[in-house]
Structure formats: structure tokens, C-alpha cells
Image (cartoon, grey):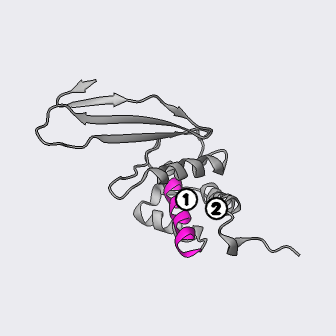
């Protein structure tokens, strides 16, 4: 579809267990200079109704965040949107921060991640259920990612 001096090409959806991936390419149609085209990737989560404060399973959000991180490069950005504009985004942002913290400094600190997002916008985390979900999601993340060895359970 052409819109002004741009052509929009909507790619076919790719279906995954926890999300669906959609792509939109934006290509300039009239340009004297070689301008790059832009690709927008939309990841739509499954299993998190707008009536729920958290997803049914932490795997859902962990999978979409992993995919989103794999798409990032130096000049690409990530944008979260959700039904009410804040709470789903806050849970995702806090989980993303907690995951980055464990990757960078091998420290699990859900509380500090929640404080960071609440500092930016107090409506990001609105209930204890969301806070508990973040703990469960980080436990799942550590269990699945065995390379964080200092978090392995000690068995006797």
C-alpha cells in the first residue's frame, strides 16, 4: 500500500507458542538519496487478558522479552504498549530490568527493579500479585538459564 512517498508492506504473521510476530516494512518510493527502509516488528502476547493483572504463566512474558531482545541492535528501539497504557508495560519493564541485572551483575533484585519503574511512573506496578509474579518469573528464568551457576540450588 502506498501512502504519500512511502510504501507499506505488511508481512505474514509468524505464530509462536506464546506470541505472534507481525512485520511492517516502510520503504520510501521517491528518493534521490539512497535511504534505508524501516522495519517495525510487533510482538503480540498470548495468554494475558486485559482483565488480568499478570499473565497466566511467566513463560509467556519471558518468551516475548527474549524475542524482543533478539531484535534489538544499536539503532533499534523497543516500545511496550498495553490496554490501559501502564500496568502491562510496567510488569514487562520491571521484568526486563530484573533480567538485565542478573545478566550484568549476577544479582537478583526484583524489589530494586520495581522501584526503578515506579520512580518513572507510579502506576506501572499496582498490586502485590504483579510483584509476586515478577519473583516467580525470575525464578523461572534462573531455572531455565543454567549458566547462572551461582544461583544453583545446593543439594546434599
> In the rendered view, does 128 fall on the left or right side of 156?
left
Choose the circle earlier in sequence order: 1 or 2.
1
- On the image, the x and y values in percent for residue 134 come to 61, 59
Q: Quadrant of residue 121?
A: bottom left
Disc 1 and disc 2 in contact, CB within 8 angstroms: yes
Say which residue label 1 marks. 95
- On the image, the x and y values in percent for residue 80 come to 43, 48
The relative height of residue 104 versus residue 59 in the rendered view (above or below) is: below
Q: In the rendered structure, which segment of residues is drawn in magenta?
A: 91-106
The disc at residue 144 is none
- On the image, the x and y values in percent for residue 29 come to 19, 31
Secondary element under disc 2, as helix, strand or loop, is: helix
Q: In what quadrant of the picture does the C terminus appear?
A: bottom right
Name the residue: 64% across, 49% down: 59
**Crowdedness near tag 2: few (<14), some (14–19) or many (≥20) residues, C-alpha within 10 Å:** many
User: Is 72 within the magenta?
Assistant: no
Q: In what quadrant of the picture does the N terminus appear?
A: top left
> In the rendered view, does 90 fall on the left or right side of 107?
left
Q: Camera-side residue: 108 or 53?
A: 108
User: Is 105 within the magenta?
Assistant: yes
Q: Camera-side residue: 2 or 138?
A: 2
Name the residue: 57% across, 69% down: 102
> In the rendered view, does 33 fall on the left or right side of 41?
left
- On the image, the x and y values in percent for residue 15 come to 56, 33
Q: Quadrant of residue 73?
A: bottom left
Say which residue label 2 marks. 138
Q: Main secondary structure of the magenta part?
A: helix
Q: Camera-side residue: 134 or 44?
A: 44
Q: CA distance from mark 1 to mark 2?
A: 8 Å
Amino acid at each position: 500500500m502506498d501512502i504519500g512517498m512511502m510504501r507499506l508492506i505488511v508481512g505474514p504473521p509468524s505464530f509462536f507458542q506464546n506470541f505472534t510476530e507481525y512485520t511492517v516494512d516502510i520503504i520510501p518510493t521517491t528518493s534521490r538519496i539512497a535511504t534505508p527502509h524501516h522495519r517495525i516488528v510487533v510482538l503480540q502476547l498470548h495468554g494475558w487478558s486485559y482483565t488480568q493483572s499478570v499473565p497466566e504463566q511467566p513463560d509467556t512474558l519471558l518468551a516475548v522479552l527474549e524475542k524482543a531482545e533478539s531484535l534489538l541492535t544499536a539503532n533499534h528501539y523497543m516500545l511496550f504498549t498495553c490496554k490501559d497504557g501502564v500496568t502491562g508495560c510496567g510488569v514487562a519493564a520491571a521484568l526486563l530490568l530484573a533480567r538485565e541485572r542478573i545478566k550484568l551483575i549476577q544479582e537478583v533484585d526484583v524489589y530494586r527493579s520495581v522501584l526503578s519503574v515506579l520512580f518513572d511512573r507510579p502506576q506501572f506496578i499496582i498490586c502485590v500479585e504483579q510483584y509476586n509474579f515478577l519473583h516467580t518469573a525470575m525464578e523461572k528464568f534462573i531455572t531455565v538459564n543454567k549458566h547462572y551457576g551461582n544461583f544453583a540450588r545446593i543439594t546434599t
